[in-house]
Image (spheres, rainbow, N blue to C red):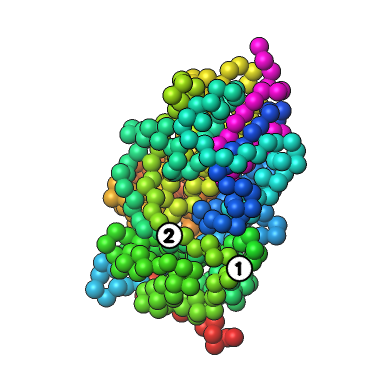
Amino acid sequence: MPTKHGRKAAIIGAGQTGVTAAVGLLENGFDVTLYSDRNQRSLREDVPATGTALIFGESQRAEASLGLTSYLEPGPTSTGLSVRLVDGREPARPEVIAFDAGFDGGTRGVAVDTRLKADDRLTRFQERGGRFRVEQVDPERLDAIAGEHDLTLVATGRSGLSSLFPVDATRTVYDRPQRRLLMLTVTGLGHGPEVFAHRGPAGGRHSAFSFITDQGEAWWGPYLHKDAGPSWSFLTWAKPGSEWERRYADVDSAASALQAVIDVHRDYLDWDLPEVLSLKVIEEDPHSWITGAVTQLVRRGVGHTAGGHVVAALGDTAVAYDPIAGQGAQGGLVQAAALVHKAAAHDGPFDSAWLTDAFDEFYDRRARAAQLVTRLYLGDDELHDYGDLFFAAAHVHEGFASKLFSLLDNPKPFEKVTSVETAKALITEWAGEPADDILGRFSPAGRFARSDLVRAA
């Protein structure tokens, strides 16, 4: 029986998840070849970041288990979340929910440009003896590659070779995107308490999240850009048919993206407008923005090439998330680390049964719950009542708000919420007092505090 040492692994796709798995397998004695349709310079300079890649404790520990840095230093990091909610269904558009809380247990979130992280890891991979091949891998070429390797992983994202892995209808809820997305990275603001000070005493050390029920959602978070270093990322989700969707459809450059962001804040999110007016685009990076849409779905974790060779899906190729709850990058890193450790401890063939078992373990451990939490943040009809209870409780009880954010790191506890009663039970457990008592103290925010950053400056 062959040992793990000298066994050959192939990974298709050199994004953050693919190159993380490549480094991990290489360090565990595998002979690894990583394939990409772009060279290293192009992967860093010629494409946009695929998301904010915000990660918390579990995914940071997954990286650390492979000997990789999570960029907590130099940061910047986020130590909490500040939420505002406007009920756009009411003619007066009341400002209803406002709370600001640190992450449970002192957790720090860090959002790093995926191009920077992948580039650093690709350099390490090659320095340690890994082979990097620049070529377009189509299904025919994948068949040949899989036939030459003991383990073949496909991490090409939501397009490309993902069609080899059929959508799992039993694990998939949506058949279309629930939001239109716009992401923009900008500079011009620091990360101290004077930034977003109207939201809470932590200021720019917390991310800012706003919900406008008839339009969509908007998030500001500290970000490490590949060129500009410490910066800010704006990610927004427009609901189908909304005014925001119409505005974001016209974006065709970083400058027009920033103008759309300014206009949306002036018309809908004016409490943060002074901060937004301080921002500027990153001139050296024409790819500092991206727009599009994601259909959240789960694919079969294992596929077969035309020649019958077995291949496994990794990251977004296997499970696609709407990024509203920050589960995509985290899930990919957790899956990659788990698969590396499982493969390193395995002395048998990486056949369909073994790969299916590995994917099912990951799905049961994290992906199923992560999909549920994402649906919660999307205001899914089946989960909407629970979200209303959670946000109302967080508005009243800072301790519960802090625990609520822990679902972004570990979504597993949300799986036991299947009714209003179990939602209240979770509130009671995390807050340390009866949910009905907390909810009985709820009253609308009335009017959010507005930024005075310009006057202070």
Q: Measured from the top left, where is residue 164 in percent x and y?
A: 42, 32
Which residue is drawn at the image coordinates 64% and 43% (left, top)? 63
Query: Can you identify the residue that label 2 sits on?
Result: 291
- Residue 317 visible here: yes
User: Which region of the structure is painted magenta?
Assistant: 1-27
Mark 1 touching mark 2, by CB under 8 A? Answer: no
Three-letter code for the amino acid on which mark 2 is drawn: Thr
- The image quadrant that residue 83 belongs to is bottom left
| Nearer to the camera, 249 or 243 | 249
Label 1 environment density (alpha carbons within 10 Å; few <14, some 14–19, many ≥20): few
Q: Quadrant of the N terminus?
A: top right
| Label of residue 284 in the image | 1
Q: Is residue 310 left or right of residue 4?
A: left
Judge whether 353 appears above or below 242 on screen: above
Give the mark, 1 or 2, whose residue is nearer the N terminus: 1
Judge whether 446 appears above or below 421 on screen: below
Is 22 covered by the magenta stretch? yes
| Nearer to the camera, 181 or 69 | 181
Element at label 1 = loop
| Label of residue 299 in the image | none
Three-letter code for the amino acid on which mark 1 is drawn: Glu
Judge whether 260 appears above or below 113 on screen: below
Number of numbered discs on residues: 2
Q: Measured from the top left, where is residue 298 in percent x and y?
A: 40, 38
Which residue is drawn at the image coordinates 57% and 40% (left, top)? 135
Q: Measured from the top left, where is residue 297 in percent x and y?
A: 38, 41
- The image quadrant that residue 261 belongs to is bottom left
- Residue 70 visible here: no
